[in-house]
Each structure stands twice: as structure tokens, then as C-alpha cells.
Image (tube, rainbow, N blue to C red):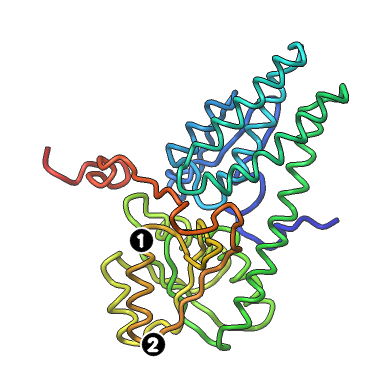
Amino acid sequence: MERADKGLPFLLKYENVADYKDGEVRILDRRAYPAREEFICCSNYHEVAKAIADMVTQSGGPWLAAALGIVCAARETKNLPLERAKEMLNQAADVLISARPTTSGNMETHIRRILKVALDALDRGEDAEAVTYEYVQKNLENRYRSSRKIAMYAIDLLPDEAHILTQCYAETLIGFLLLVSQERGKKVSLICPETRPYLQGARLTASVACDMGVPVTVITDNMPAYILSKGMAQVFISAADVITMDGYVVNKIGTFQIALAAHFHGIPYFAMGLPSIAYATINEVAIEERNPEEVLHAMGTRTVKT
């Protein structure tokens, strides 16, 4: 079967999101890209969870990294008594699920499913590492194919020529949106707010567009309302960290104000994603509050007086 990441750029190839080899989870450090192509190697699930919490990878990246963290934990259980091995796998799942609070509900559903595969393999006396890795790879293919289908629905809502305002980094969804638009002959371009403090819009979304030959303009985070007021974008599109069952969209900080500006100026806003049964209402979403020190720096350089 043809790989589902065919036609996607470097950032979205499976192995450049996260990979597993020889007992290590290898994660592309998106904090450094595109200035440097560096990978963080994690030899145990604790290191994987720390990498996720430290923003080594974002958007859909933690989905794959955490899954491979369970594979890594399964390797660690080799030669352990059965009950101790199961205990370790359950501990690994708990640690990985809690790495990022806002998406922990979705992550729990995802990781518990993978955990069950590993535990069942142990009960059958099989190689839990190999069985779990194979399951994760199949799920990865399915996730990419689902992202492509979502992008196809989004493309149907766009005019034949469109300047698209984005927010942060929608990962596979933005990649497939651009790929499908090219396949259908639609002329699209992106306008990417930089997305402080990690600049995912400038460094990641814009890089994907450049690698795919799509025109892209990077703007400051202060500019979306002005762009929308001048009719310079025909649509605002983002991913969604969570879509609750009562209809709320939770995404990168700043998405709300852009959506309000788009509504005020009569510009449609489309959030790409799937509702999550893990969140019946918006009240069940724990919004992550990160270290305020992050606001005082840009790409590792302090920008505020000490």
C-alpha cells in the first residue's frame, strides 16, 4: 500500500515527526526548525513525556511521540515478571497522557487504546514491543488518511482562488489542504501569523507552504484584524486541539480573537478537526497555562529587561 504521507513535505513525513528505532524514540525538534534539522532521542517514556511538555513537538506531533513512548515502555518490560511489566506499562500511559493538559482527554483515549494492545500482547506471551509498534504504524496511516479526508471537505468550501489566513501550525491538515488544492487546480496562498513565543506559524506553517511551492506571507501576530478588514484574506482556517461535543473549538491562544475579527468582517472561519467524545462540554477542557517566562523570550533570546 502507498504511504499516506506521499506528496507531503519534509516536516510531515512520518519519520520526521517521530520515529522509533533500536529502542529509542526520535523526535524532530520543531523548536529549532527550519534553522536546524535536529532530532531529540528519547531512551525511555519519561524522556518522551518531557519532550512533549517542553514543546519539542506540537500540533499532531505528540500523538505519534506518545504512542511511540508506549512502544519504548514495552521494550523496557522485557524480562520483567508479567504483573510488573503490566504495572510499568500503565505507569507509562499515565505519564504520557498528562504531558499536555489541554489535550489530555483525547490523548487518554488514544494512549489507552495502544496500552490495551501492549497488555494483550503480554498476556499472549508475544513480543509487546513489536506488536505495539505495528499497531501504531497502522494507526498513523489511518490518521493521515483521515486528515486528507478532512482537507478534502475543507477544499470544497474554498473558492478557486483564495488567500487563506492561518493560525499556528495545523500540521497534516494544512499539508493535505495544500496538496489537495494543487491536485484540484485551485490557486491558494497562505498568510501566516508568526505565532509567538515559538513562532510555529513563521517557522512551520510557512516552511510547509514553501516546500510545496505555495505562495506564503508571514505577518506579525498583531496584523490579522487589519488583514481581514482590507479583504486581503478570503477565509480563516485553523486546526483544533479540541472540538467539544457541545460545539466549542479549543485551539492555540489567539485563535479566538482572529475568529472574532473574521466574524466582524464577514470572513468565514473553518476549524478543521473532529469532535471528541472525551469532552462532552467546554467545562471539561483544562486549558494549559504555560510558564510565563516563555513570554519574555523569543527563540531563546531574552527580549525583556531583567
Above or below 35: residue 224: below
Which residue in the protein does label 2 denote? 266
Residue 80 in the figure: left or right of residue 45: right
Frontmost residue, 182 versus 282: 282
Q: Which residue is mark 1?
A: 194
Query: What percent of the width, then of the height, locates residue 225?
Result: 30, 76
Amino acid type, residue under disc 2 in the picture: Gly
Q: CA distance from mark 2 to mark 1?
A: 23 Å
**Residue 232 percent across, percent down from the top left:** 37, 84
Quadrant (top left/top right/bottom left/bottom right) for the N terminus? bottom right
User: From the viewer's perspective, is the residue at label 2 or at label 1 nearer?
Assistant: 2
Residue that appears at 48% across and 67% down = 238
Secondary structure beneath dot 1 equals loop
Please, what secondary structure does the residue beneath circle 2 have? Answer: loop
Q: Please tell me which residue is depicted at 64% across the width and 60% down the height of the picture.
A: 8
**Front residue (pair 100, 296):** 100
